[in-house]
Image (tube, grey):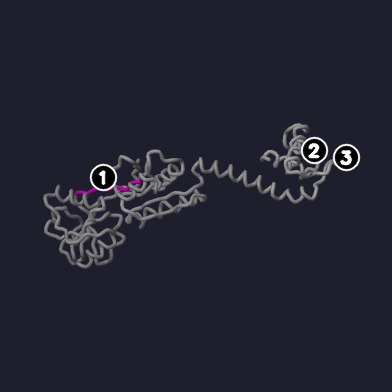
Amino acid sequence: MDLRQLRYFSVLAETLNFHRAAERLHISQPPLTVAIRKLEEDLGTPLFVREPRGVRLTAAGVAALPSARAALAAAEGFRDSVRQGAAGLRGRLGIGFIGSAIGQLLPRIISPYRAAYPLVELALEEMNSVEIVAAIAARRLDLGLVRLPLMDASAVEIAVIERDELAVALPTHDPLSGRTSLPLAALEQHGFIIYSPISVLNATIRLACRRAGFTPRVAQEAVQVQTILSLVEAGLGVALIPLRSARFATARVRIVPLDDPIPIEMGLAHALDAGPLVRNFVAAALAVQGVNS
């Protein structure tokens, strides 16, 4: 028994006439007659009663018809799923993201993507950039939002998704908080609240300070920008944060741009052999952000 026989049986059950069923199936009548007879032989019972002007279903045929239709519908659903999967319209995406992406970037990407690809299941997991790249390489994640540059990007392909710059976060009682902009060297005597070493921004900030002629005096390390800003508010030091994260600052923290901006980037990382599911997500994300791939 195969799907062809089930389709023949279903159409004949609807038309109750071999000639009309053959026309609907776009075949000649003899192959249809042979296929139905073979199906009945395989099942060990007749499905139709042959009459001079057509056929009628036997009790076995009446009982079998719903199952035959369900099997045909399931087969069509299977074909649709395969086509949709091959086109990146259906499936499951494992996405890693760094904490600073959760505020604006991730929601801005996810909402329109879900509207455009409702059959794709998204599994989101917060990680740092190093962990995301390792998970992509191990096939535990499909892609991730990471802070650039990566220390080792050999196993992934990167698409820049967002460009930003670092700005100074100071408590409002700091004398420098009234400035409209600052040279980085003006912070030399301040203690720094800095991103922990797992963040790319740790190395970015240390390198920028060295280029400005000093080594930052680290008062505290933290992972999340909200924590960093809270420590700045408490007067434990100053910080360099992404300018887009300024919205997390309270009224007791002042965000001041640098005279010489320090550019930073966020990217979408994925495996070099990524399939259409991932490629569709990257294209949709770049389109939302207005970034040329």
Query: Is 220 left or right of 17, judged from the image as shown?
Result: left
Query: Is 99 left or right of 54, judged from the image as shown?
Result: left
The residue at 24%/67% (across/down) is 252
The residue at 31%/60% (across/down) is 247
Q: Is residue 129 above or below residue 7?
A: below
Image x and y of residue 14, in percent? 76, 45
Q: Nearer the viewer, residue 163 or 2?
A: 2
Residue marked by disc 3 = 52
Q: CA distance from mark 1 to mark 3?
A: 81 Å
Q: Which amino acid, mark 1?
A: Met
Residue marked by disc 2 = 18
Q: Earlier in the sequence, mark 1 or mark 3?
A: 3
Residue marked by disc 1 = 151
Question: Which mark's residue is nearer the viewer, 1 or 3?
Answer: 3
Query: Is 56 left or right of 199, judged from the image as shown?
Result: right
Q: Earlier in the sequence, mark 3 or mark 2?
A: 2
Image x and y of residue 206, in percent? 18, 51
